[in-house]
Image (cartoon, grey):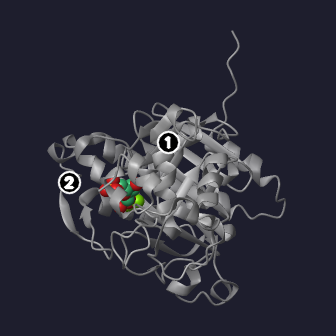
Amino acid sequence: MTTRRRFTLTQYLIEQRRRFPSASGDFNALLLDVALACKAIARTVAFGDLGSMLGQPAPDVTTSVNVQGEEQKKLDVISNEYFTQMTEWGGHLAGMASEEMDHPYQIPATMQRGKYMLVFDPLDGSSNIDVNVTVGSIFSVLRAPQDVIDSGRDVVEADFLQPGTEQLAAGYALYGPTTMLVLTVGNGVAGFTLDPNLGQFMLTHPNMQIPEDTHEFAINASNSRFWEAPVKRYVDECLAGKTGARGKDFNMRWIASMVAEAHRILMRGGIFMYPRDTKDAAKHGRLRLLYEANPVGMIIEQAGGRASTGREPMLTVQPTALHQRIGLVFGSKNEVERIERYHREPGAYKDDANPLFAERSLFRD
Ligand SMILES: O=P(O)(O)OC[C@H]1O[C@](O)(COP(=O)(O)O)[C@@H](O)[C@@H]1O
Ligand SMILES: [Mg+2]
Ligand SMILES: [Mg+2]
């Protein structure tokens, strides 16, 4: 009997490092620390309410409100702690930033500081915890500015304001029926499944690729009255199906965990939209640029898909704030390019005042 050779995450990272013979190993060590944090979160998530019976905190209890005015579940806070505690000690990081922390996190002075910065959403889709639906963690690795590396000074917000093109690695963990880690170090995308017996992430999805075309879209349709005309046009055409401009039927999905939607799209194609809208004039979208849109954007593009604001490629956006929100469209390349085209020609399908739209829109006010 022959056993099929399986790579662990560690072996995959060693293999990737061969491309950089002078690499110190810090980068790989950091990613393994992140993977350890994800395993710890996966275990806490899997215990669910049983955890509290066994003396652990109940994951669905709301504790406080974060900098963005959103309620923090206990599991948001616990996951944030797993990330900081399991990555701060290794000497690889100059600092961190997270959805759940108002300001950059400083590596304690008693610990060695390194050359990378970790940015993360410790638990994405946390409103789904109470209903036992897939959640995940999203992370991005940046290089610290040279003066931070040289001086070992505290990191400040401005150090993190790097466009997505500067990301050295990005990934997400998925806490669903199986626990998975999906990772790019800038050389394609690989997916690993957690073997609970070994406690190891095993390479199960090498070289993930997104089909260029799709008939599946994901958007929170309850926001339709706030959408801009190009998005209304796109969704309306999808809904019109075979009888409309697209000449084919579409299917719709909405999990309310962006990380789970990203995974579905990586596995079988599709398009996800949380576009800029007019719901709240103070917010240019729902999702966060540095720890949601950019890492997912890098993964999607490394898998042959496309990520965009609708107006410009996501990864070229110059961030202006740590917790900046942005309109996000990603997925199968041809569909994202179509939406970008609709943004360039808004006059072709104005808004609700446009008689054509008003007649055909299923989401009309
Ligand atoms: O369905 P809604 O309420 O529009 O929002 C869902 C979106 O909010 C998010 O859950 C935001 O992430 P957090 O749980 O990290 O705040 C996304 O994953 C998801 O796409
Ligand atoms: Mg999130
Ligand atoms: Mg979150």
* Residue 119 as seen in the image, left or right of residue 204: left
Inspect the image, locate mark 1, and give the three-letter code of the amino acid beneath it: Cys
Q: Is residue 105 above or below residue 342?
A: below
Q: Quadrant of ligand 2?
A: bottom left
* Residue 147 as seen in the image, left or right of residue 233: right
Residue at mark 2: C-beta within 8 A of ligand 3: no
Q: Position of residue 23 (x, y in %)?
A: 77, 63
Q: Can residue 128 be spotted in the picture? A: yes
The foreground one among 360 and 308 is 360
Marker disc for residue 19: none
Of callouts 1 and 2, which one flags the residue occurring earlier in the amino acid sequence? 2
The foreground one among 115 and 321 is 321
Q: Position of residue 165 (x, y in %)?
A: 68, 68
- Determine the residue positioned at 21% across, 51% down: 56
Give the residue number, with chain letter if any, for mark 2: 57
- Report crowding for label 1: few under 14, some 14 to 19, many 20 or more residues within 10 A (C-alpha): many
Give the residue number, with chain letter if any, for mark 1: 238
Measure the C-alpha gap from mark 1 to mark 2: 44 Å
Q: Position of residue 130 (x, y in %)?
A: 22, 46
